[in-house]
């Protein structure tokens, strides 16, 4: 099958699953987010510390699950935020266990395990804050808006980059991602702003215009940085894709890299200005 067709089919499937999970029920959303988070963690560990410290990886995954589920329990059922501290226990065990691992890479590995919590577990856990209101009612429209901005940015960057940035384009970050161009960046910004305006007009972004514009810009900027961060990681470890689970796209991290930085940044903005 042609790679472009594979990418199109896989991309449509991803969008469909995300949309269904956000529009219908928290009992679809939670398993989908957990699955994506776990695959991202697995790809990150395979990339950074292949074949090493399986028990420690298991503890880090446990910490991620506890963090996600306690955040969900807090916003959905009103359970105390103190329970979130339980996610710290497996991480403390990892630190102590590191003292007994006689391996040249032990400290690097411990650092990667902690990085996975900040880079992957926290962003996915924070999505719970975007889909539940103060009364624990599920509404996935705001998070869907976040996804749409990131997707629009990706599509715009790809189309404008292919059209204007291939032959005589100006490279954005050639040392990290040679194919990315400034032309693609501006194209992504344009499509992100268009998407943001549409989302505001439809009432998905139910806050003032200035906030909708700022949120759109935050999501765009940090999605670009998220893409570059993952590209830097892959270049450092000399791999092309983070995995092979998505035909034509590579790994789960390759598809959610922008969201991993964009979603926390957007969530923090909304919290600071009391919009959620």
Image (cartoon, helix red, strand yellow):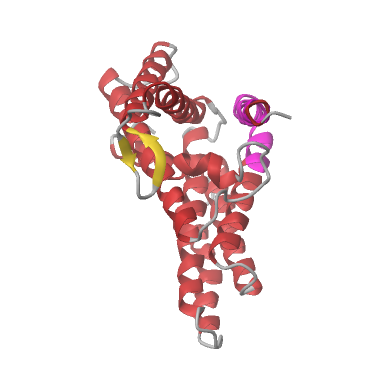
Q: Residue at x 68, y 38 (%)?
A: 247
Does residue 186 lie above or below 85 as drawn?
above
Does residue 59 lie above or below 235 as drawn?
below
Does residue 260 lie above or below 22 as drawn?
below
Q: The N terminus appears in which quarter of the rendering?
A: top right
Q: Nearer the viewer, residue 9 or 267?
A: 9
Q: Along the horizontal axis of the image, is 74 left or right of 180?
A: right
Q: Residue at x 39, y 34 (%)?
A: 276
How many marks are shown on the rendered structure? 0
Magenta stretch, main secondary structure, is helix
Task: Report the residue that reaches farthest toward the top.
Answer: 201
Task: Report the residue that reaches farthest toward the front.
Answer: 167
Q: Position of residue 143 (x, y in %)?
A: 49, 31
What residue span does the magenta drawing correspond to? 6-32
Q: Along the horizontal axis of the image, is 93 left or right of 7?
A: left
| Residue 232: in magenta span | no
Q: Position of residue 153 (x, y in %)?
A: 42, 27
Q: Position of residue 30 (x, y in %)?
A: 63, 41
| Residue 10: in magenta span | yes
Q: Residue 15 falls in which quadrant of the image?
A: top right
Q: Residue at x 65, y 73 (%)?
A: 55
Q: Nearer the viewer, residue 194 or 67?
A: 194
Q: Nearer the viewer, residue 276 or 41?
A: 41
Q: Position of residue 110 (x, y in %)?
A: 49, 73
Does residue 158 lie above or below 97 as drawn?
above
Q: Residue 58 falls in which quadrant of the image?
A: bottom right
Can see residue 23? yes
């Amino acid at each position: 099958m042609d790679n472009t067709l594979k990418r199109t089919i896989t991309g449509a499937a991803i969008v469909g699953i995300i949309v269904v999970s956000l529009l219908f029920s928290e009992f679809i959303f939670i398993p989908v987010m957990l699955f994506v988070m776990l695959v991202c963690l697995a790809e990150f560990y395979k990339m950074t510390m292949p074949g090493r410290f399986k028990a420690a990886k298991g503890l880090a995954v446990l910490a991620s699950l506890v963090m996600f589920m306690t955040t969900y329990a807090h916003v959905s059922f009103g359970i105390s935020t103190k329970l979130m501290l339980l996610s710290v226990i497996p991480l403390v065990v990892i630190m102590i266990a590191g003292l007994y691992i006689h391996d040249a890479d032990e400290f690097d590995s411990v650092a990667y395990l902690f990085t996975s919590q900040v880079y992957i577990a926290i962003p996915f856990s924070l999505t719970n804050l975007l889909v539940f209101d103060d009364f624990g009612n599920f509404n996935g429209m705001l998070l869907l808006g976040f996804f749409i901005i990131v997707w629009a940015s990706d599509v715009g960057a790809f189309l404008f980059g292919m059209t204007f940035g291939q032959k005589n384009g100006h490279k954005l970050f050639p040392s990290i991602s040679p194919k990315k161009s400034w032309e693609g960046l501006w194209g992504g910004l344009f499509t992100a702003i268009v998407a943001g305006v549409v989302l505001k007009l439809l009432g998905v972004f139910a806050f003032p215009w200035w906030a909708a514009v700022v949120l759109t810009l935050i999501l765009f900027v940090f999605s670009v940085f998220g893409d570059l961060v993952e590209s830097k990681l892959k270049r450092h470890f000399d791999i092309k894709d983070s995995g092979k689970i998505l035909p034509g796209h590579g790994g789960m991290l390759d598809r959610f890299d922008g969201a991993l930085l964009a979603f926390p940044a957007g969530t923090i903005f909304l919290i600071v200005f009391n919009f959620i």
